[in-house]
Image (cartoon, rainbow, N blue to C red):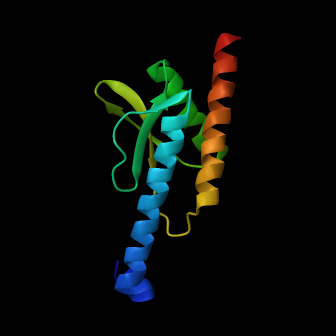
């Protein structure tokens, strides 16, 4: 923590926090506008909880596991009101909107892939 404070200072840390809050809200807007995903809770700080609409807990877990195994992004999952939800957390100081857009595209592609493989 000391090194971050020293490297960025108060204003730099505030700017990073504001940017992460903006990115989390933006990601939440993408999820809310999606036909295939839904927000599971209001966007809070740098955390977005969401899930594939009308899908099972196992389906949502497979999305997370597949993405994490790919090494292209890292997601968490948790239980919220008895349902498995995907949890995207922003905290890396190098995360940009492009990274987030790429992650969103990967999540959607992975959901389509999981859907196709579960029907086969």
In this view of the protein, can residue 89 be seen by the observer?
no
Q: Position of residue 94 (x, y in %)?
A: 56, 69
In this view of the protein, can residue 106 be seen by the observer?
yes
Task: Specify whether 67 is left or right of 77.
Answer: right
Using the image, determine if residue 113 lies above or below residue 20: above
69 or 111: which is nearer to us?
Answer: 111
Image quadrant containing the N terminus: bottom left
Instruction: Please name the residue shown 38% across and 83% down the image.
Output: 11
Residue furthest to the top in view is: 120
Q: Quadrant of residue 119?
A: top right
Task: Specify whether 96 is left or right of 51.
Answer: right
Q: Position of residue 92 (x, y in %)?
A: 49, 64
Q: Position of residue 48 (x, y in %)?
A: 42, 45
Using the image, determine if residue 11 lies above or below residue 24: below
108 or 26: which is nearer to us?
Answer: 26
Instruction: Please name the residue shown 69% across and 19% down the image.
Output: 116
Image quadrant containing the C terminus: top right
105 or 25: which is nearer to us?
Answer: 25
Using the image, determine if residue 55 lies above or below residue 99: above
In this rendering, the count of numbered labels is 0
Q: Position of residue 61 (x, y in %)?
A: 50, 29
Instruction: Please name the residue shown 55% across and 28% down the image.
Output: 62
């Amino acid at each position: 923590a000391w090194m971050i404070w020293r490297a960025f200072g108060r204003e730099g840390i505030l700017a990073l926090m504001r940017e992460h809050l903006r990115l989390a809200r933006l990601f939440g807007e993408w999820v809310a506008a999606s036909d295939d995903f839904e927000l599971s809770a209001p966007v809070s700080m740098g955390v977005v909880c969401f899930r594939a609409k009308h899908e099972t807990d196992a389906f949502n877990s497979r999305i997370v596991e597949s993405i994490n195994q790919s090494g292209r992004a890292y997601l968490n999952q948790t239980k919220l009101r008895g349902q498995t939800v995907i949890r995207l957390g922003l905290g890396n100081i190098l995360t940009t909107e492009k990274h987030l857009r790429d992650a969103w595209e990967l999540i959607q592609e992975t959901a389509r892939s999981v859907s196709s493989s579960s029907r086969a």
